[in-house]
Image (cartoon, rainbow, N blue to C red):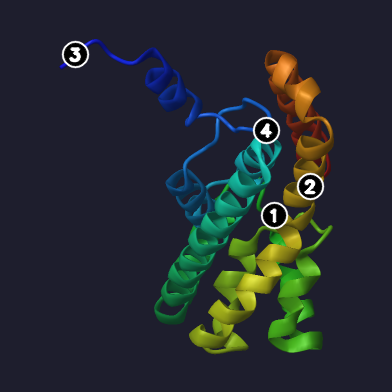
Amino acid sequence: MNDVPNTHSINVARQSEMSSATGLWRPPSWLGFLWGFAEGTFFFIIPDLVLSWASLAGARSGIKILGAILAGAVVGGLCIYTWALWRPDSARFAVAAVPFVRTKMFGKVQEDYGAYGVSGIFYTLGTGIPYKVYAVLAPSVTSPVTFGLISIPARFERLALSWLVPTMLGLFLKRWIRHHRRLTAALWLGFWIVIYAVYWSTV
């Protein structure tokens, strides 16, 4: 038998780590889950970074990461909810200690919950208020099952643009991206640096 490795097979194996559309690295689903969970608890960098990159790499890659992030975020949110259910003061103190979480955010979330009930979680869009703040205040307005279920569309609403726009760019610019992977990475990184610089200067 021929024990010499087949060059074509090796190339195929290497290419399996890349998107067939753009040639970009595709983040694994576990990374999306862990990032979603971390940001839903005590991490302060939004999972939109890994989501937007995965979506640039390919539509299928983006959908997988989106699903993983949603799952991780809901699990993380329920952990915060459970903590707040039993030890509300310590849970709120821990969430308030997360970088860039402001005291005024708790007041805004309480207003949303007071006016709209648990549906107030949908009013996070455009406010810059982290999901964890809604989670830690949720026990006063809803059950854990309802909070977990409503968190799925609420988190999707917040992540939708970071999934849809890069997916469209990846589809329509896939040839350009394939031939300019380093420039694509630089533009992606620069975009998020600007976004965070603006956000951190305004919250």
Tag nearer the camera, 3 or 2: 3
User: From mark 4 to mark 1, how far is it between C-alphas?
Assistant: 41 Å
Could you tell me the amino acid type at mark 2?
Answer: Val
Is 106 displayed left or right of 203 in the figure? left
Label number found at residue 21: 4
**Is residue 180 shown to the viewer in this render?**
no
Question: Quick check: marks 2 and 1 in contact, CB under 8 Å?
Answer: yes
Front of the two marks 3 and 1: 3
User: Which of 156 and 121 lies nearest the eye of the viewer?
Assistant: 156
Q: Where does label 3 land, which residue? A: 3
- Residue 22 coordinates in the image, percent (x, y): 68, 28
- In the picture, the disc for residue 102 is 1
Q: x and y percent of residue 6 in the render?
A: 33, 16
**Which residue: 62% across, 53% down?**
63
Q: What type is the residue that disc 1 sits on?
A: Arg
**Mark 3 crowdedness (10 Å alpha carbons): few <14, some 14-19, many ≥20:** few
Quarter location, residue 137: bottom right
Position of residue 171 measured from the top left corner of the image (x, y, whole percent):
78, 39
Q: Residue 149's x, y, as percent?
A: 58, 80
Q: Image check: 12 left or right of 151?
A: left
**Does residue 130 appear to the left or right of 122 in the view shown?**
left
> What is the tally of numbered marks visible in this picture?
4
Element at label 2 = loop
Residue at disc 4, secondary structure: loop
Name which of mark 2 and mark 4 comes first in the sequence. 4
Q: Residue 203 carries which label?
A: 2
Closer to viewer: mark 4 or mark 1: 4
Say whether residue 57 is visible. Answer: yes
Rendered position, 11 above or below 40: above
In three-dimensional space, the C-alpha distance between marks 3 and 2, rounded to whole angstroms, equals 61 Å
